[in-house]
Image (cartoon, rainbow, N blue to C red):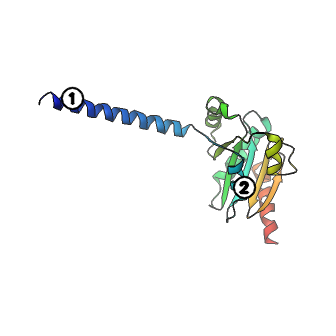
Amino acid sequence: MKKLFPEAIVLFFMRLCFFLLISISFLSNKATSQAVIGRDVLQKLINKQDDTLRIFNFWASWCKPCVQELPYFEELNATNNTKKQKLYLISLDFPENIKRKLVPFIKNKGIHSEVIVFDGGNPNVWISEIDTSWSGSIPATLLSFQGRKQFQEASFDSTEQLQEFIQNFINRFKS
């Protein structure tokens, strides 16, 4: 009887340690992982019909103009006081480079906005699904609100220029 009690305690502590290690591992992976979505999920986000303005910025960590404009999107997102505006930073980095390149890049640049990795397959197919005028160059930005869209295939030079682009889109609904 005495032998069983210490073994039960040892077994309990081993299970507890295992559970804690698994929990810590899960939490640390969750903090450094990025969602990878395909064409169907992106199209659902773009075409969602509600009272939220969705801003999609297509970029990559290896694209200098993209990296230069990221702070403007970050500032826009940080100063957003409404739940009726949602920013998606759609990374076109290769999914196999997420942990090795993209996650460190996001941490190094202090990006707090939602970053989604897009794996849409053949670009010749999905680029025209986003906007028929898109040549495929990045950065590119798409605004989507209640079935209406505005696309820009160019970088922004300031937060003010980005805000003006958004405000002009919104003003079209008021007139």
Three-letter amino acid code at the position of disc 2: Ile
For label 2, the residue is 46
- Structural crowding at the residue carrying mark 1, measured as other residues with C-alpha within 10 Å and reported as few (<14), some (14–19) or many (≥20): few
Locate the N terminus and report the quarter of the image it occupies.
top left
Query: Which type of secondary structure does the marked residue at label 1 adopt?
Result: helix
Q: CA distance from mark 1 to mark 2?
A: 57 Å
Residue 8, placed above or below residue 126: above
State which quadrant residue 93 falls in: top right
Q: Position of residue 28 (x, y in %)?
A: 50, 36
Tell me whether circle 1 and circle 2 mark residues in contact (CB < 8 Å).
Answer: no
Residue drawn where x is 56% and y is 37% of the image: 32
Dot 2: within a 10 Å radius of its alpha carbon, few (fewer than 14), some, or many (20 or more) residues?
many
Residue type at tag 1: Glu
Which SS class for mark 2?
helix
- Looking at the rendered image, the disc whose residue lies closer to the viewer, 1 or 2, is 1
The residue identified by callout 1 is 7
Q: In this view of the protein, which residue sits in the foreground, 152 or 129?
A: 129
